[in-house]
Amino acid sequence: MNIHEYQAKQIFKKYGVPTPRGIVANTPAEAVKAAQELGGNIWVVKAQIHAGGRGLGGGVKLAKSTEEVRELAGQILGMTLVTHQTGPEGKLVQKVYIEEGADIKDELYLGVVLDRAKEMPVIMASTEGGMEIEKVAEETPEKIIKVAVDPAIGFQGFHGRELVFGLGITDPAEQKKFISFASKLFKLYMENDAELIEINPLIKTGAGDFIALDGKMGFDDSALYRHPDIEEMRDISEEDPDEREASQYGLSYVALDGEIGCMVNGAGLAMGTMDTINYMGGTPANFLDVGGKANAETVAKGFEIILKNPKVKAIFVNIFGGIVRCDRIANGILEATKMVDVHVPVIVRLDGTNALEAAEILKNANIANVIAATDLADGAAKAVAAAKGE
C-alpha cells in the first residue's frame, strides 16, 4: 500500500524526522487559506498522487504570493499528471499540499528499501538529490552509496559513518545531524513494516540542517493489520480498480502492457509463465495468481478481470495442482464461459491433483476456443501463436 507525501510527512514527524510545515488542500480557496496559516512569502504547491517525478511533470510549483497559490492550485487540481512512474495514462490530481519555502543549500537522496538478495533492508544515499534515482543508477552508479543493515543489530554508528563519508559530509556537526536523521528513518521503516521510504530531495539548509523536502512511502499489505492507523490512510482512488477488485476475491493481479492474459497459481510459477511467454516471442498482459484457495467463482472473476483489457488476444491458464485442485479450475473455466463473453482463445495447461478429471471436464464441455496444452513450453507457444492469430 502506498500513501501520499503529506501522509508520509505526518509519520515522519512522529519519529522526529525534520520536514517543512505544510497543509493539504482540496480546492484553490483551501490552498490560499493554508498559505495564510503557514505564513511567510514563499510557498510550494505540490500535486498529491502516488507517483514520483511530479516536478518534472508540472505538478510542483513555487508561489510568491497568495494569489499565485490560488492560481497554481487551480491549475494543478483536476489535471491529469503524467510522470515516468504513472505511465502515459497519468493520474488525476485531487489534492495539493501547500508547503512553506525552504532554504536549500544542497540536495541529496536518501531511501530505505528491502534488498531481497541480501535479505535485509538497505539504506541508499546519493549526492544527486532531485534527480531520478533510476537514471543515476544507470548512468553513474558509483554515486549511490548502499549500506545494508542487519535487523538483528539495527542501525549502528558505523552504518551512519559509512553514509556520511560516502556522501562527502566532512563537518562533524553536519555528520551528527545526518546520522541522527538516517537512524530515525530506519527506525520508522522497521517499526511500520514499510517496503520503501524515499526522500528525494533531502535538503541541507544554509544552517547545516537536514530536512525531508519530499516523502514517499510504501507498506507491506500483509502487515497492515498491525497498523490500523496507516491502513486508514489508504486512498483507493489512487489504486488500479481492477487490482482492487481482484484483491477482494483473493486474487493477486497486476496489469501489464502485453496481449496474453495469464492465470496461474503461485507467484513463482506466474513469473516463470510470463518469462516463458516472453521467451516464446509474446508479451504478458497481466500477472494473476489465483492462489491456493481458487474455486469456480474466483476463476470466473479472474477471466472477467483479464478480459476487461481490450488488448488481450489470448489467455494462458497454467495450473500446477498441489493445494488447488485442477478440477476446480476446469469448473471455473466452464463457469467463466457462462458468465463472461470469453471471445479469445484460452490455452489450458492443468497438471497435478485431479488433472485427469479436469481434462475430462473440459473435453466433455466441448468449448470451441479452449485449447489443451501438455506442459508450460507447449502452452506458452500455443498462447503466443493464438495471440498472433495463427
Image: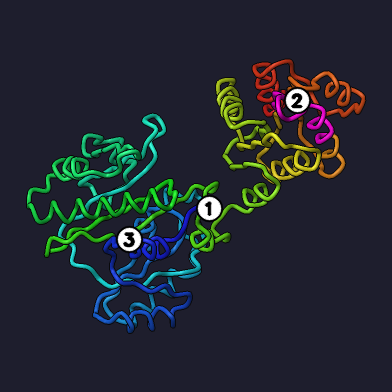
Separation (CA) of disc 2 from disc 3: 51 Å
Please state the horizontal and vertical placement of residue 52, each as a whole percent of the image: 40, 53
User: What residue did someone put label 2 on?
Assistant: 348
Separation (CA) of disc 1 from disc 2: 35 Å
Is 298 located above or below residue 215 in the figure? above
Name the residue type under label 2. Val
> Which residue occupies the foreground of this view, 190 or 170?
190
User: What residue did someone put label 1 on?
Assistant: 224
Please state the horizontal and vertical placement of residue 300, each as a whole percent of the image: 78, 41
Q: Residue at x 33, y 80 (%)?
A: 35
Residue furthest to the right in view is 364
User: In the picture, which quadrant includes the C terminus?
Assistant: top right
> Which residue occupies the foreground of this view, 206 or 182?
182
Name the residue type under label 3. Tyr
**Mark 3 element type:** loop
> Which residue occupies the foreground of this view, 116 or 368?
116
**Mark 2 element type:** strand
Q: Is residue 321 magenta?
A: yes
**Mark 1 element type:** helix
Q: Is residue 159 left or right of residue 117?
A: left
Specify start and end residues of the magenta stretch as a single range. Answer: 318-333
| 1 or 2: tag closer to the N-terminus | 1
Name the residue type under label 1. Leu
User: What residue did someone put label 3 on?
Assistant: 15
Is 135 located above or below residue 237 in the figure? above
Separation (CA) of disc 3 from disc 1: 19 Å
Q: Residue at x 76, y 34 (%)?
A: 344
Residue furthest to the front in view is 152
Q: Is residue 93 magenta?
A: no
Q: Is residue 321 left or right of residue 104?
A: right
| 3 or 1: tag closer to the N-terminus | 3
- Camera-nearest label, 2 or 3: 3
